[in-house]
Amino acid sequence: MTASASATTCLVHQAASLLLHHPDTDWSARLELVERELEHLPGPPDRSVHLLRTFCRAVRGTPVLDLSARYVTTFDRSRRRTLHLTYYTDGDTRRRGASLLRWRQLYATHGWQPPADELPDFLPLALEFAARCPEPGRRALRDHRAALELLRLALHDHHSPYADVVEAVCHSLPGASPADRAAALRLVRTGPPAESVGLLPPPSFPPGARPAPDVPLLRENPR
């Protein structure tokens, strides 16, 4: 991967992280920031960038309260569309504890402090980690490729605009996406179990607790 492509992938992961967090009072500023940075990328946009721009256009002008209600219905009220990656491979089983612990250890190894009130396999947090610590972060996303693909397919079935964001993430990873749910489920069984990352309360890093990025990344207003 060239330096330019790597920087674009970091930006795609950071943008997707911001877009997949719950839309709250800073949503308009967050959306404008993502749109501005995506527009300023040099060269023709790749498919991931195009998909993120499509999502931004689809939700632009939607009242925050309406988008918030849609977000809750989409992600919080359906196990098939959860943003917690290890649920897709471990479900509500004992294995999730070990998987979450591996996520937490991964973050700790690279200087990240998970928050007490979030699970560490929360996709927006995993994406921010991948943007700021690309090598281990992208490896973790690849290890959870099956979960990402199942989420992508479920969002398409739900006719959710968020499908474009998750598809952008899938497209940023090496290899082709499974064609359907059956193929994605086979990936769950045959995917890379050696470094399967688990679930733990995900990191909501307070301002100042995150490491300085190695490449220019999108910046949210402090929460």
Image (cartoon, rainbow, N blue to C red):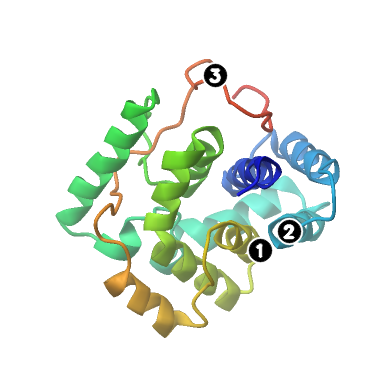
- Find disc 3 in the rendering and name its residue: 207
Q: CA distance from mark 2 to mark 3?
A: 27 Å
Secondary structure, mark 2, is helix
Q: Amino acid at mark 1?
A: Asp
Secondary structure, mark 3, is loop
Q: Is residue 13 above or below residue 95?
A: above
Q: Amino acid at mark 2?
A: Phe
Q: CA distance from mark 1 to mark 3?
A: 28 Å
Q: Amino acid at mark 3?
A: Pro
The reply, left or right, for residue 192 in relation to residue 83 is left
The mark that comes first in sequence, 1 or 3, is 1
What residue appears at the point 69 percent right and 45 percent down from the top-left corner?
Answer: 8
Q: What crowding class fits label 3: few (fewer than 14 Cα within 10 Å), some (14-19), or many (20 or more)?
A: few
Front in this rendered view, residue 64 or 200: 200
Q: Are marks 2 and 1 in contact (CB under 8 Å)?
A: yes
Where, quadrant-wise, is the C terminus in this rendering? Answer: top right
Tally the numbered discs: 3
The reply, left or right, for residue 108 in relation to residue 5 is left
